[in-house]
Image (spheres, rainbow, N blue to C red):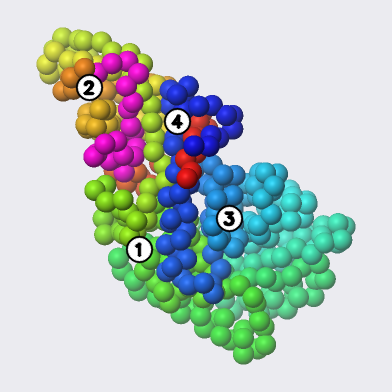
């Protein structure tokens, strides 16, 4: 087991997340099997690799067949470069205020959609004697960033005249590929495909054409073009609201093809135990009142760690392989669980907030639905103070 920086053995960490790099590689391999050898995979590692740790995940992705990495910001790209990782990195949110120096100095590729931005990037690249690769963002219905399809030709002509810019890619992003109704995504695919065909007929050959996020990789083979941008499925979760996603059930190892394995477990331990009589109010606001004489355990995980306050009195945790309820308002740094049903619980017992313990499992999807959000937000909320322990081999 290798350990994240700062190098601490997990035995010395009261609360930590355990990141299974083999599961990540497995998930990347599943994407590879789905899209084929001839397509490029842009592994999305933005937001600190969805809370899994950008550097270790980026390194694992690079050595396991990701052709490019996707980040949101220049700082995120810089962090990966400073760790010595040389893979191509695409900045998905594009070059924003104050970003051009970083894009040039870290050799990042940038999404672009405004001519003024490309012009200033070209000037910056010229100063350094470099060429910046850009990917043109087309808005086919997300209404977020991008150029309208009928303005793309004009944009390409203008960008082609800039000597320090190379058009390496063209992309679009889906607004509703995770929804059951396929009509809007099919329309977006058609708009993008027609545009690419027309550009080809006009003699514009752009090396990389990409559109698919995780949901589209699972459901829309028509949207693969020659590169794909998986995010959430690499972390073993799902973009879908419905439970029909191919994710590993807890009973199986998840080694079968097309199945994605959870990468993160989130673990803490009991730091205090006390018995209370029936009728005792627990935590801030006394929102939970014991209905029997109870054994209450305290765990050092709260909303500042990403254990959302909206989970209060709703979530369950695993102790000694059993589900027990979280009780009372979740505080900033701690919360309580009711272990009355368990025998022989002691201080130091492992408590799993997310992931497997024995035959039980708490999935990120379960926490997300209880908290009224999506797995993406649960992952991204897990705070920096939750140290990571990396498991490999
Ligand atoms: C975040 C992001 C992705 C990955 O999305 P998932 O749903 O996590 O697969 C792909 N493309 C762009 C532009 C993104 O911002």
In the image, residue 295 lies at what x, y percent?
A: 21, 15
Which residue is labeled 4 in the image?
16
Q: Which is closer to the viewer, label 4 or label 3?
A: 3
Give the numbered dot on residue 257: 1
Q: Kindly report the distance in space between the C-alpha atoms of the residues bearing marks 2 and 4.
A: 21 Å
Upstream in sequence: badge 2 or badge 3: 3
User: Magenta region: which residues?
Assistant: 345-363
Q: Which is closer to the viewer, label 1 or label 2?
A: 1
Tell me if the residue at label 1 has its CB under 8 Å from ligand 1. Answer: no
Q: Nearer the viewer, residue 42 or 347?
A: 347
Q: Which is closer to the viewer, label 4 or label 1?
A: 1
Upstream in sequence: badge 3 or badge 1: 3
Which residue is labeled 3 in the image?
63
Name which quarter of the figure residue 291 lies in: top left
In terms of secondary structure, where does tag 2 sit? strand
Answer with left or right where residue 358 lies relative to residue 184.
left
In the image, residue 31 lies at what x, y percent?
A: 45, 63
- Which residue is located at x 34 percent, y 43 percent? 364
Q: Nearer the viewer, residue 250 or 334?
A: 250
Q: Which is closer to the viewer, label 2 or label 4?
A: 4
Q: Is residue 352 magenta?
A: yes
Query: Crowdedness of circle 4 by 10 Å Cα count: few (<14), some, many (20+)?
Result: many
In terms of secondary structure, where does tag 3 sit? helix
Which residue is labeled 2 in the image?
338
């Amino acid at each position: 087991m290798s350990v994240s920086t700062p190098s601490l053995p997990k035995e010395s960490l009261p609360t930590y997340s355990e990141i299974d790099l083999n599961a990540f590689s497995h998930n990347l391999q599943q994407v590879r099997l789905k899209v084929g050898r001839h397509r490029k995979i842009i592994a999305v590692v933005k937001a600190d690799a969805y809370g899994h740790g950008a550097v270790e995940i980026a390194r694992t992705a690079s050595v396991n067949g990701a052709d490019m990495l996707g980040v949101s910001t220049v700082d995120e790209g810089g962090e990966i470069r400073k760790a010595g990782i040389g893979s191509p990195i695409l900045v998905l949110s594009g070059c924003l205020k104050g970003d051009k120096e970083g894009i040039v100095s870290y050799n990042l590729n940038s999404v672009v959609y405004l001519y003024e931005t490309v012009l200033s990037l070209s000037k910056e690249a010229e100063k350094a004697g470099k060429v910046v690769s850009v990917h043109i963002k087309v808005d086919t219905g997300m209404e977020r960033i991008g150029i309208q399809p009928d303005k793309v030709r004009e944009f390409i002509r203008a960008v082609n005249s800039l000597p320090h810019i190379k058009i390496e890619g063209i992309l679009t992003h889906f607004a509703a590929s995770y929804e059951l109704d396929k009509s809007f995504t099919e329309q977006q695919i058609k708009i993008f495909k027609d545009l690419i065909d027309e550009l080809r007929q006009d003699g514009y050959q752009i090396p990389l054409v990409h559109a698919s996020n995780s949901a589209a990789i699972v459901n829309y083979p028509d949207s693969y073009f020659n590169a794909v941008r998986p995010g959430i499925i690499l972390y073993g979760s799902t973009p879908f609201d419905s439970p029909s996603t191919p994710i590993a059930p807890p009973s199986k190892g998840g080694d079968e093809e097309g199945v994605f394995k959870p990468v993160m477990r989130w673990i803490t331990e009991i730091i205090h135990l006390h018995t209370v009589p029936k009728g005792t109010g627990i935590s801030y606001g006394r929102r939970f009142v014991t209905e029997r004489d109870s054994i209450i355990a305290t765990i050092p995980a709260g909303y500042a760690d990403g254990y959302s306050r909206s989970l209060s009195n709703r979530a369950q945790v695993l102790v000694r392989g059993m589900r027990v309820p979280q009780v009372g308002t979740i505080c900033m740094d701690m919360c309580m669980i009711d272990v009355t049903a368990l025998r022989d619980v002691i201080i130091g017992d492992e408590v799993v907030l997310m992931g497997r313990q024995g035959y039980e499992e708490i999935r990120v999807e379960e926490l997300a639905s209880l908290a009224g959000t999506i797995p993406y937000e649960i992952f991204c909320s897990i705070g920096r103070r939750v140290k990571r322990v990396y498991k490999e081999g």
